[in-house]
Amino acid sequence: MAIRAVLWDIDDTLFDYTGADRAGLARHLADEGLEERYGTPAQALALWRETTERHWDRFAAGEVTFQDQRRDRVRDFLAAPALTDAETDAWFELYVGHYKAAWTLFPDVLPVLDALAAGYRHGVLSNSSTANQDPKLRHLGLRDRFEVLVCAAELGVSKPEAAAFLAACEALGLPPGEVAYVGDQPETDARGARDAGLVAVWLDRDGGRGPGPAGIHRIEGLDRLPELLAGDTRFGARSGIR
């Protein structure tokens, strides 16, 4: 079956989430007088990301609400368990303001979407919420590029579960074998898509994380994606596409 559509991850695939997170957190800590508390900016970001991932996993497992995982992230990061919900919400919203000010696309995003626009349908599958991702895509000028936006918070299931990928394919009205999924995480995105029957494309922008799971396609930039989609993606890859 030929590939007829591409499903996209957003954060650190289309949108430079790590760069915005780093810049937003550094500015917020400076404004709060906390820039020295965590050592270097890199150490602060590492702790924030670890805290984020831990509480996001709790949300993905259905243990807490979306808002409560945000509140718990703030309490853990600040080592302030007694903070009220209102206090954590206020702290988080100030951080979000700085984070949003740093939003940007990766430079290869618009060229590849333009190159693929005529030949493929496009959608998004994200492990976040529509309330988060729809405004982000609109701010970045991308929302109209995608027919569907499918998010874990509304689905009740997250990547890498096959049900998440299959729900996005169903939203497009296509079988998984006619859909490619592009994301930056080798396990959550690539392995999950592969196991659900999609053509799995791992975007390894750093280029140093190894080959990834078997049965997926690894690219180091989105400029390689048109060649990959045009080729025989199921029985080997062309030179430069792993």
Image (cartoon, rainbow, N blue to C red):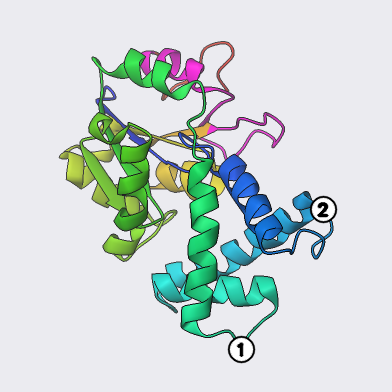
- Write down the quadrant of residue 74 in the picture: bottom right
Q: Nearer the viewer, residue 211 or 105?
A: 105
> Is residue 163 visible from the viewing direction of this image?
no
Give the residues in magenta.
203-230
Q: Secondary structure at mark 1?
A: loop
Query: Is the N terminus in the top left, top right, bottom left or bottom right quadrant?
Result: top left
Compare marks 2 and 1 and give the one earlier in the sequence.
2
Q: Which residue sits at x=57%, y=43%?
A: 20
Q: Amino acid at mark 2?
A: Thr
Residue at numbered disc 2? 40
Q: Nearer the viewer, residue 135 or 111?
A: 135
What percent of the width, then of the height, locates residue 232? Answer: 40, 16
Q: Amino acid at mark 1?
A: Ala
What percent of the width, then of the height, locates residue 85? Answer: 48, 82
Residue at numbered disc 1? 82
User: Looking at the picture, does residue 189 appear above or below residue 152?
Assistant: above
User: Looking at the picture, does residue 128 appear above or below residue 177?
Assistant: below
